[in-house]
Image (tube, rainbow, N blue to C red):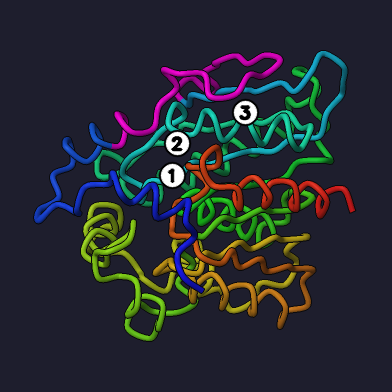
Amino acid sequence: MPLDPQVLEIYKSKPAPPEKYVLEEMRAGADATFNDKTEVIGIYGYEDRTILGYLPIRIFYPGDKGPYPVLIYFHGGGFVMHNIASHDSLCRKLSTELNRIVVSVGYRLAPEFPYPACMEDGRAAFKWVYENAPSFGGIPEKIVLSGDSAGATISASVCLWNIKHGLPLPEGLVLFYGMYGAVSEDESESFRMFGNGEYVLPRKMSDWCMGLYIPKDADLSDPYLYPGKALSLSGFPKTVVVSAEYDPLRDDGEKFYSRLKEDGCDAKLIRVEGVMHGFMLYWNRIDKAKELVSEINEILKG
């Protein structure tokens, strides 16, 4: 399917990918493009907190009556950029549309804090929300883990960790175009087709991000680094895996979904045609993103 017309409209104003990636410049550009300086969508209320003495979160409230189910959200950004502010409007949309409290987590970024810091923060955030949800109107037994790109990977890794260690589990996961290591870049047709620099995630940028994030002596078969490398995914709760047609990571996400199904999990794959990696950040400009949120709402209610 050709690129969606609304995606083409966005690409008109997007600069070409840089020849060289400089961390400070990449972060500054990301912050200028995606931030919370303009209120894209209203919400009943929100508050910023710091938990565990170091970890920032933003809690979004859909209304004043509760208790509410909860969605913990981990932002994308290749593990090296983006933050709570960049995903503010998306979290507001998810909170209002899903009628859930959303807890957005500002996990530590590489290279200042390489793997496994973000995964440790993800596990700590889930534990804190599970133990403290009633204090802010949430239901501990009704927590969904979610995130886009790097955030989807964190969500899957946290769930896998809790399964393997006999810890409380979320009631479900909503994973937007994550990187799971279920298919290598060299084996991936979608990486060959869409990783050439014309789309949001060129292979050169992906390799740069992962080079900053993964320590040189890391075990690349570590399932908490790449959940798609786990020997078994048995025990995952209801999981929605979202892929994008024009995303280099499409094949990896869809293989991860297949692994979940093979291991007997309740999983649903939604491939969104005509869109690119990162399309959820443009939810207010891409109708298919809005429709996807409504579809996810129906799945979570079912």
Across and down, in percent, residue 165 comes to: 66, 57
Instruction: Say above or below: 34 vs 266.
Output: above
| Residues drawn in magenta | 30-54
Question: Which residue is painted at 49% across and 71% down in the image?
Answer: 250
Across and down, in percent, residue 232 comes to: 64, 76
Q: Are marks 1 and 2 in contact (CB under 8 Å)?
A: yes
Q: State which tag comes first along the sequence, 1 or 2.
A: 2
Q: Secondary structure at mark 1?
A: helix
Q: CA distance from mark 3 to mark 1?
A: 23 Å
Residue 92, label in figure = 3
- Where residue 273 sits, quadrant-wise, is bottom right
In-front residue for pair 289/57? 289
| Number of marks present in the image shown | 3
Q: Secondary structure at mark 3?
A: helix
Q: State which tag comes first along the sequence, 2 or 3.
A: 3
The crowd level at tag 1 (other Cα within 10 Å; few <14, some 14-19, many 20+) is: many
- Give the mark toward the camera: 2 or 3: 3
Instruction: Say above or below: 273 vs 56.
Output: below
Q: CA distance from mark 1 to mark 2?
A: 6 Å
Q: Is residue 66 magenta?
A: no
In-front residue for pair 219/129? 129
Q: Are marks 2 and 3 in contact (CB under 8 Å)?
A: no
Q: Which residue is mark 1?
A: 118
Q: Which residue is mark 2?
A: 107
Question: Which residue is painted at 48% across and 24% down in the image?
Answer: 56
Could you tell me the amino acid type at mark 1?
Answer: Cys
